[in-house]
Amino acid sequence: MRNLLIAGGAGFIGSNFVRFMLEKYPDYHVIVYDKLTYAGNLQNLLEVDDDPRFAFVKGDICEPQAVEQAIKEHRIDTIVNFAAETHVDRSIMDPDAFIQTDVYGTYVLLEAARRLGLERYHQVSTDEVYGHVPGEHRSLESDPVAPRSPYAASKTGGDLMAVAYHVTYGVPATITRGANNVGPYQYPEKVLPVFVTNALDNLPLPVYGDGKQRRDYQYVLDHCEALDLVLHRGQAGEIYNVGTGGEMENLAMIEILLDELGKPRSLIQHVTDRPGHDRRYCLNVDKIKTLGWEPRHTHEQAIRATVRWYVANEWWWRPIKVGERYKQYYEANYAQRQVLAGT
Ligand code: NAD
Ligand code: TYD
């Protein structure tokens, strides 16, 4: 493994992974292949921009010829696929791009890995493929998939295709299913960056429903370490869950966020819930731990570190939030939600 194609490397997790890998492996070359959708941002990669081991290719994973050309030109031996439409609320408003990129685009990359005989294909997936997890259960990699949003269903399609390409054609594919990530450079549509940046401007935090949904907020660099480990020590054909293995209510996450900022609870505003909202995700992470991985951050450390990054990096998020494209999204997603009294 020397020449990595990082599809979707200009997004949140991908850009953190690019920095992480270039720092850790002095002899690796990292090529980011990214369409630069609203979520892709070259400013996420400023720190590696002048590294001779780094290159950027603007391209769509749904275009087979462009993918093949990038692989050949840069002598790629490994693909790590972060490229996806990633936001549940957007998938509810308009699922089309999710099906294109997360299903068809994954197929295009897998097909390239097969035809060109690559050493490894890694699919970055999500705990959302398991759907709502009732009771005390923690999802195992062997559990049936049961996605409930268009986003989760599209990601599940990508996972199943990666498994099929391994079983049918012997493509050395691995899959990780990560819990919610938090950290630097997350686009302000996911809950933590929306809420921190709203709170900094003393704007309401729109909590869906009662706010008692449960998530496992893990620090993005812990996730990157796990991805690195799976690439180097994971078995082809295997799936690995990645998260802290814990869970917390959204309201508890918000308490920590407000405490770190010194902002009042009165900013919390309960609004109409997300349709089909999964109440709980929770992962069993024993399998990835057998590879020698442990998360380094607790929920609280991950949330506080992320809040501090947004406080210190207004240059990054302020221009996004004042942009017309963002305002249109915010209006479309939030304007029709009613404020709920008495929650
Ligand atoms: P993101 O939305 O921040 O970034 C996605 C990137 O993919 C962007 O740079 C975008 O330009 C690019 N992209 C989108 N469509 C493309 C296409 N057709 N061709 C090429 N590039 C394209 O996403 P993220 O939060 O960094 O998530 C990365 C991956 O991790 C996704 O596959 C997501 O499903 C998975 N994941 C995310 C989380 C999370 O909490 N954010 C948790 C688990 C798994
Ligand atoms: P999100 O960051 O969209 O991730 P996902 O839905 O993929 O887990 O949302 C995390 C949780 O926060 C989820 O339970 C929905 C909730 N949420 C809100 O309450 N308000 C918001 O404005 C957003 C974006 C999310």
Image (spheres, grey):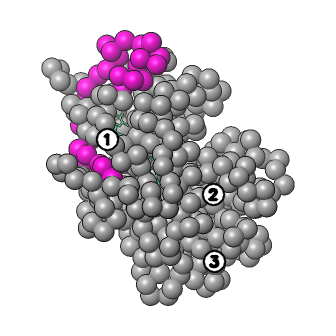
Q: Residue at x 56, y 72 (%)?
A: 121
Q: Position of residue 226 (x, y in %)?
A: 52, 55
Kindly state the secondary structure of the residue where label 3 is placed.
loop
Residue 277 covered by magenta stretch:
yes
Q: Earlier in the sequence, mark 2 or mark 1?
A: 2
Q: Of helix, strand and loop, which one carries label 1?
A: loop
Look at the image and tell me whether residue 62 can be seen: no
Mark linked to residue 286: none
**184 vs 241: above or below:** above
Q: Which badge, 3 or 2, is on the more N-terminal residue?
A: 2
Q: Are marks 3 and 2 in contact (CB under 8 Å)?
A: no
Badge 2 amino acid: Asp
Q: Quarter for ligand 2?
A: top left
Q: Is mark 2 within 8 Å of ligand 1?
A: yes
Q: Nearest the camera: 98 or 81?
A: 81
Residue at the image position 33 percent from the left and 55 percent from the top:
284
Residue 33 within the segment the image draws in magenta: no
Rendering quarter of residue 142: bottom left
Q: Which residue is mark 3?
A: 119
Q: Quadrant of the C terminus?
A: top left
Q: Position of residue 204 (x, y in %)?
A: 36, 20
The amino acid sitting under disc 1 is Glu
Q: Earlier in the sequence, mark 3 or mark 1?
A: 3
Asked if the beta carbon under badge 3 is closer than 8 A to the nearest atom of ligand 1, the reply is: no
Which span of residues is magenta-colored?
254-283
Residue 34: image tag: 2
Callout 3 amino acid = Glu
Q: Which residue is mark 1?
A: 247
